[in-house]
Image (cartoon, grey):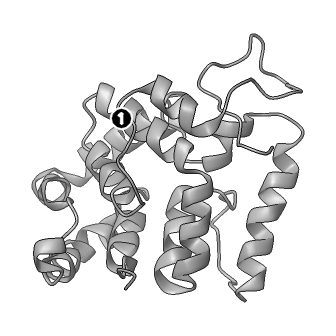
């Protein structure tokens, strides 16, 4: 029987979004919903305590520093595999097609369709199976983001760990293991990436 990860995906989607008063208002709801998972409860307890105990202005600065001002933690799944290459346009179109196939019409607030909180929300409230397929396809991206956040001792690493734990098998322990998971070689064509960014990974079969 497949486990239902929708609660985790919705909580993770909120946690990885820009912190505001609405997010703070969701903390008790997330804690209660995750507690109902009992022994299968995802590992977000520490992060939720961090949200609850930290001033909103501090949370906002930390989010911007982590995801907006740093090139090491992009929340865009296809950036890790395609960077700013021309082929990424087709990849983003494929994300949109997955959403359209499920009649998912949402306000992306200007974000690209591969924005991780958006993908998680899709998996949580629209189509868990199709959402998990996207997460599985871009698992190397998730794992690299998890490793990068862990190396920088970011509280957000726990959220990525929780998401990766919903996917089959153990998470890779280092970048070399992620490379083995993803396949080898840089994108065939790079635009604006000189020299080739070693954080990027090819998708198998790309």
**Vertical relation: 110 (above or below) 54:** below
Instruction: Please name whichever residue, 194 or 180, is drawn nearer the observer in this view of the structure.
Output: 180
Residue that protrudes farthest toward the top in the picture: 195
Report the residue at 38% width, 59% height from top. 163
The location of residue 148, given as percent across then percent down, is 40, 30
Of 76 and 179, nearer the camera is 179
Quarter the N terminus occupies: bottom left
Could you classify mark 1 by the number of other residues whose Cα lies within 10 Å: few (under 14), some (14-19), or many (20 or more)? many
Horizontal side, residue 122 vs residue 201: left or right: left
Q: Position of residue 41 (x, y in %)?
A: 18, 71
SS at mark 1?
helix
Determine the residue positioned at 41% across, 59% down. 168
On screen, residue 47 above or below 42 = above
Spot occupied by residue 204 in the image (x, y as percentages of width and height):
72, 43
* Most foreground residue, 10 or 137: 137
Seen at 20% across and 59% down, the residue is: 43
Q: With 105 as the anchor, is 90 left or right in this view?
A: right
Question: For residue 16, what is the image quadrant?
Answer: bottom left
Image location (x, y in percent) of residue 26: 26, 76
Q: Classify the position of the C terminus by image quarter.
A: top right
**Residue assigned mark 1:** 149
**In which image quadrant can residue 111 be found?**
bottom right
Q: Is residue 94 left or right of 3 when viewed as pictured?
A: right
């Amino acid at each position: 029987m497949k486990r239902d990860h929708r609660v985790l995906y919705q909580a993770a989607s909120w946690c990885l979004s820009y912190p505001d008063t609405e997010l703070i208002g969701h903390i008790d709801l997330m804690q209660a919903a995750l507690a109902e998972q009992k022994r299968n409860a995802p590992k977000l307890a520490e992060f939720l305590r961090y949200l609850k105990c930290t001033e909103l202005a501090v949370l906002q600065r930390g989010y911007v520093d982590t995801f907006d001002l740093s090139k090491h933690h992009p929340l865009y799944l296809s950036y890790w595999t395609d960077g700013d290459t021309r082929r990424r346009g087709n990849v983003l179109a494929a994300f949109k097609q997955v959403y359209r196939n499920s009649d998912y019409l949402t306000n992306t607030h200007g974000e690209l369709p591969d924005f991780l909180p958006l993908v998680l929300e899709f998996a949580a409230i629209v189509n868990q199976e199709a959402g998990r397929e996207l997460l599985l396809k871009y698992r190397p991206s998730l794992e690299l983001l998890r490793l990068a956040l862990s190396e920088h001792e970011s509280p957000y690493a726990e959220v990525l760990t929780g998401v990766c734990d919903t996917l089959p098998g153990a998470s890779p322990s280092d970048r070399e293991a992620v490379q083995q998971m993803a396949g080898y070689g840089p994108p065939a064509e790079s635009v604006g990436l000189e020299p080739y960014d070693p954080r990027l990974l090819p998708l198998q079969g790309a």
